Amino acid sequence: MSELPHLVWDWNGTLFDDVAVVVAATSESFVRAGLPEVTLADYHAHYTRPIPDFYRRLLGRPLTEPEWRILDASFHTAYRRLIGSGAVDLVPGGRALLADWVAAGGRQSLLSMWHHEELVSLVDRLGIDALFVRVDGLRGTPGGVKAEHLRAHLAAMDVDPADAVVIGDSLDDAAAATSVGSRAVLYSGGFHGPAGLAAAGVPVVAALADAVALARQS
């Protein structure tokens, strides 16, 4: 492995401090459909990907295809409205962590399951685009898992998966890293509770600075 690994950052719930907004948008979409509201505790207890499986856990039953389409569209409408004010920013200290990694000679990229065009626009608006060698969002059907996206992301940069560390907030981030042969460090400030993240068998930290420190270790 090189002196500094390549960091692959997750976005929602990791670098982007939007957990409260995601929970609120999910709850709004459920209530609009005549379903129970959703709380952060519900996320910590049941969150998983693909998202239809998460909704199945919340409801205790499978979704019909029409229900999934309605909830997904309603969620995205609510989420875009809630972040449109510009009040949601990076997690505290996030900019400094990114800038310090680059200053130390490290390389990093961003891989998100949020829609690609909107992600690129938001990263540009937040003024951090120059800190990443590549930014990839979702191109295609929403709600899926990250593994194949991570494989393509690393291949596009010609990064050996063994030289990469994924920093994210979900079991899906850890599963994606494992599937390609990368390391992972999980952040407990996102959509999973710490107890749930422990099942991944990778380091779990309460601060992103600790995630970066662990990533430095070979």
Image (cartoon, rainbow, N blue to C red):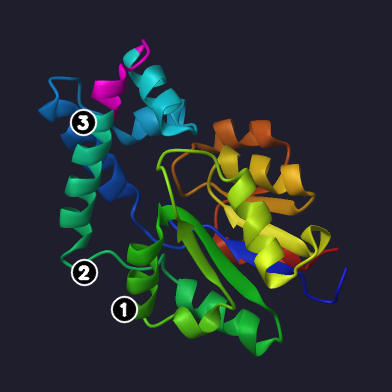
Q: Which residues are magenta?
A: 60-68
Nearer to us: label 2 or label 3: 3
- Residue 139 in percent (x, y) is at 45, 54
Above or below, 209 relative to 130: above
Q: Quadrant of the C terminus?
A: bottom right
How far is disc 2 from disc 3 in space, using C-alphas? 26 Å
Q: Which mark is residue 125?
A: 1
Horizontal side of residue 152 vs 135, given as left or right: right
Circle nearer the N terminus (2, 3): 3
N-term mark: 1 or 3: 3
Question: Which quadrant holds residue 167?
Answer: bottom right
Report the residue marked by disc 3: 70
Q: Amino acid at mark 1?
A: Arg
Give the residue at mark 2. Answer: 86
Choose top left, top right, bottom left or bottom right for residue 123.
Answer: bottom left
Q: Position of residue 114 (x, y in %)?
A: 40, 54
Q: Residue furthest bottom?
A: 103
169 lies left or right of 64: right
2 or 1: mark nearer the eye: 1
